[in-house]
Image (cartoon, grey):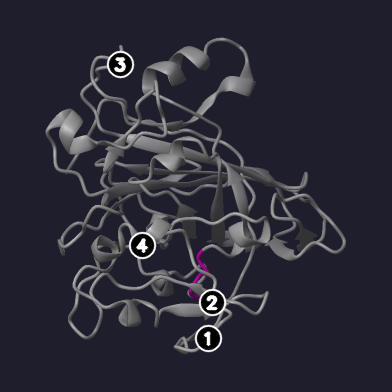
Amino acid sequence: MHTYKHRFVLTLTFLVLLFTPQLFIASAQSTNKHSETNPNNRYEKELLGTCTKETHDQYVVAGKDGKQYSTWHPQQDPSGCVFGHEHGDDPTKSRANSSLPAFGYAANQVGMNESHEGFKIYVANRGDTNDEGRVALADSRIMVHMGTTNPRRFAERLHSFQYDLEADHGYFVHVEGMADTGDVGSICQRNANSRDNNPTNDVGRTVVVPKGNGCDLGSLYEVWAFNFRVGDKLNIHASSAVFDPISVMNPHNSGEFRATKDEYGTQAFGCQREAYHGPVYWYNQDGETTYNTDAYGNIQENGVFTQRISAHQSVGIPMTHDQTLFKQISNQCSLGGIGKVN
């Protein structure tokens, strides 16, 4: 069990939208397949592990736009081969939403292309007990785009996000979209900025920096706070964190790849993670339960995203007996075989 002094909860709001795709096998001749970023196939061997590209390309779903999108797959294919990356918890085990998500669908609607290995899923069902002994009181599923290899993540604050929740008393959320993760910085910068009474520079992506940059805390904990709203009707807070990011941020050149193992002497695979489910704020008493929005959660009559939220007024609901969020560790390292991208 890993514990860190500097573990913390960052709560920001973020939009998401419901999307229920259908799984099918991709045709080798298909010309309507959306492809996530993999520049010049630079990491294809590490991404595929011992599996073939053809094996990986079988895991697709149909998007609302008629295109095929990659989706979740187990790290070990039934054939026995092992992929060099993983996508977290099995979404089909979620009682909030057991459908397979379309990786990159939301980003594609706004002309963005996100790296495939960055899509991670967290599942928490009622009755689950976390490492603190707290028991989940709601079914919750998070899908985020948060890889730990590509330094591009230090510059891009908008990332795909999907959130599903089913709770007592008829509370529900089924949304998807592009979430704002805020500014990027070290935990030292985050703490300083949070005290300057200027919310416009708050750090939402707290990342690790190399030693010698004035923030040598000894922790490799990277955590992102996802921020999105559905108009003025819903405000969701969720965070995704990793204990072993594959790379760290050079604050003087954030686009430069700096391997964690070179900076800290620790082999890292980006597979030891945790998530914070909630809190969720409803401002939708007597409102509609379905809203059309754009990718950023702005309510529009002809919006291409369909958001479903319950008609409630509540600033947070019990996710445990004493908290309006549920923290759960997701360790995906046991199988091994993870390469340079995850």
According to the picture, the residue beneath numbered tag 2 turns out to be: 33
| Marks 3 and 1, the one that precedes in the sequence | 1
CA–CA distance between discs 2 and 3? Answer: 43 Å
Q: Are marks 3 and 1 in contact (CB under 8 Å)?
A: no
Q: Residue at x 55, y 23 (%)?
A: 202
The image quadrant where one finds the N terminus is top left
Q: Are marks 4 and 1 in contact (CB under 8 Å)?
A: no
Amino acid at pointer 4: Asn
According to the picture, the residue beneath numbered tag 3 turns out to be: 215
- Looking at the image, is 3 positioned above or below residue 43? above
CA–CA distance between discs 4 and 2? Answer: 16 Å
> Which secondary structure is most common in the magenta stretch?
loop
**Residue 30 has which mark?**
1
CA–CA distance between discs 4 and 1? Answer: 19 Å
According to the picture, the residue beneath numbered tag 4 turns out to be: 41
Amino acid at pointer 1: Ser
Amino acid at pointer 3: Cys
CA–CA distance between discs 1 and 2? Answer: 6 Å
Q: Which residues are magenta?
A: 99-103
Q: SS at mark 4?
A: helix
Q: Is residue 256 left or right of residue 288?
A: left
Q: Residue at x 61, y 70 (%)?
A: 19
Q: SS at mark 1?
A: loop
Q: Are marks 1 and 2 in contact (CB under 8 Å)?
A: yes
| Marks 4 and 1, the one that precedes in the sequence | 1
Q: Residue at x 32, y 77 (%)?
A: 53
